Image: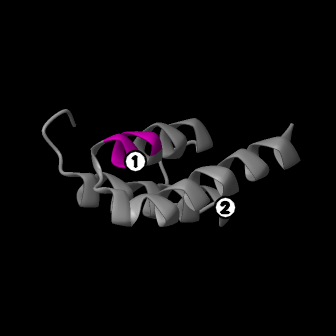
Amino acid sequence: MREASADFRFAAAVATFAMVLRDSPHREDATLDAALTLAQGSLQLAPDDQAEDRTQLIELIHQAKALRA
């Protein structure tokens, strides 16, 4: 996924996060860690005006991980 755009990574992070939270039968091997990695990658590549949404997603994933611990 090295060549994926920031927007694609962000969308993939959101979808992965949602599938894990809902325990979707389609999630296969998706994890909160995978969603976090995608979200962090999208933040690194995103323009400054998109950073807030991506940072909020990262915070939500951290909160979900803490609840599952």
Secondary element type, mark 2 = helix
| Residue beneath the point at 86% across and 48% down | 67
Mark 1 vs 2: CB contact within 8 A: no
Q: Which residues are magenta?
A: 40-44
Alpha-carbon distance for marks 1 and 2?
A: 21 Å
Q: Which residue is mark 1?
A: 43
Mark number displayed over residue 65: none
**Which marked residue is nearer to the observer: mark 1 or mark 2?**
1
Provide residue 30's location: percent of width, then percent of height. 50, 44
Question: Can residue 44 be seen in the rendering of this structure?
Answer: yes
User: Which of the image's four quarters has the C terminus?
Assistant: top right
Q: Is residue 29 above or below residue 24?
A: above
Check disc 1 and give the amino acid type.
Leu
Within the magenta stretch, is there residue 42? Answer: yes
Q: Is residue 6 left or right of residue 64?
A: left
Question: Which residue, as the protein is rendered here, is positioned at the far front?
Answer: 48
Answer with mark 1 or mark 2, whichever residue precedes in sequence. Answer: 2
Quadrant in which residue 22 is drawn: bottom right
Provide residue 32's location: percent of width, then percent of height. 60, 44
Within the magenta stretch, is there residue 23? Answer: no
Q: Is residue 46 above or below residue 52?
A: above
Q: Which residue is mark 2?
A: 21
Q: Is residue 5 above or below residue 52?
A: above
Tell me which colouring the rendered structure shows.
one colour
Q: Is residue 63 left or right of residue 22?
A: right
Instruction: Tell which of 26 and 4 is nearer to you.
Output: 4
